[in-house]
Image (cartoon, coloured by chain):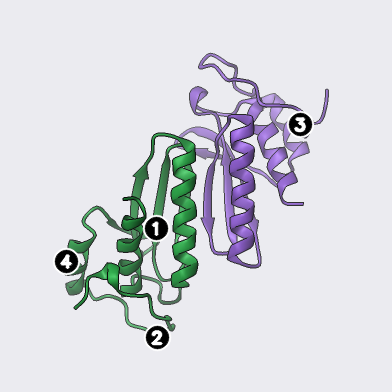
Chain colours: A purple, B green
Amino acid sequence: MPALVEQKCEACRADAPRVADDELPALLKEIPDWQVISDDAVLKLSKVFNFENYADAITFTNRTTDLAEKEDHHPAILLEWGRVEVTWWTHKIGGLHKNDFIAAAKTDKLNT
Amino acid sequence: MPALVEQKCEACRADAPRVADDELPALLKEIPDWQVISDDAVLKLSKVFNFENYADAITFTNRTTDLAEKEDHHPAILLEWGRVEVTWWTHKIGGLHKNDFIAAAKTDKLNT
């Protein structure tokens, strides 16, 4: 199995499978800094990226929106001064698809 | 008194005055679509802007970050597909300064 960061998000249907609970540990091992959060019973992947100034936070936001367009998968991006919180989940299935883990791994790469 | 949109944010000190409760109605009249929300007892101004696609939401986000740099006042911007939520408050005083109302009025102008 290739690393998450080398995979591509697949078009997601409403009946696509959510990631099963027993698959989570192996997937999270590749993105250890991401938190699984429950937002109104919808599981999401979230991570805060800190920056020294506003310009760097904006640059990272722009890279993340470029990634979103490329993968055709769109996260919530909360941009503040020196801080960007990125949250991935799959709206259509109301939870986490493997796409979200791939996108999270690729988001990490944007900050290196 | 000039309209909010014609004023400029002033540098804000930790001992700058919060907007008093009895000043709120007149200020909110100029930005009628903004909500005053209480976030952990900190009052903030928040508004959701909806867009037909991701590109328009990104364009509006970029305009808002440009405004933030120009005013040297930085909001929380929550960007999702077709939706941007902008929240203004003054961190230093833990609440709303007149700057936030000026910034909100100018944010509305970015979407016209």
Q: Chain of mark 1?
A: B
Q: Rounded to the nearest whole Å, what is the CA distance between mark 4 and mark 2?
A: 23 Å
Q: Rounded to the nearest whole Å, what is the CA distance between mark 2 and mark 3?
A: 49 Å
Number of residues whose C-alpha sits closer than 10 Å to that of mark 3, classed few (under 14), some (14–19) or many (20 or more)? many
Dot 2: element: loop
Amino acid type of the residue that numbered disc 2 sits on in the rendered structure:
Asp
Q: Rounded to the nearest whole Å, what is the CA distance between mark 1 and mark 3?
A: 34 Å
Pointer 4 with pointer 3, Cβ within 8 A: no
- Residue labelled with disc 3: A4
- Residue labelled with disc 4: B25
Dot 4: element: helix
Dot 1: element: strand
- Decide which of A9, B60 is in the foreground and name it: B60
Same subunit under labels 2 and 1? yes
- Residue labelled with disc 1: B87
Label located before the other in sequence (4 or 2): 2
Amino acid type of the residue that numbered disc 1 sits on in the rendered structure:
Thr
Label located before the other in sequence (1 or 4): 4
Task: Evaluate whether residue B5 shows in this view.
Answer: yes
Spot occupied by residue B59 in the image (x, y as percentages of width and height): 47, 47
The residue shown at (30%, 62%) is B105
The residue shown at (64%, 21%) is A10
Residue B29, compared with residue B6, is above or below; it is above
State how many labels appear. Answer: 4
Pointer 4 with pointer 2, Cβ within 8 A: no
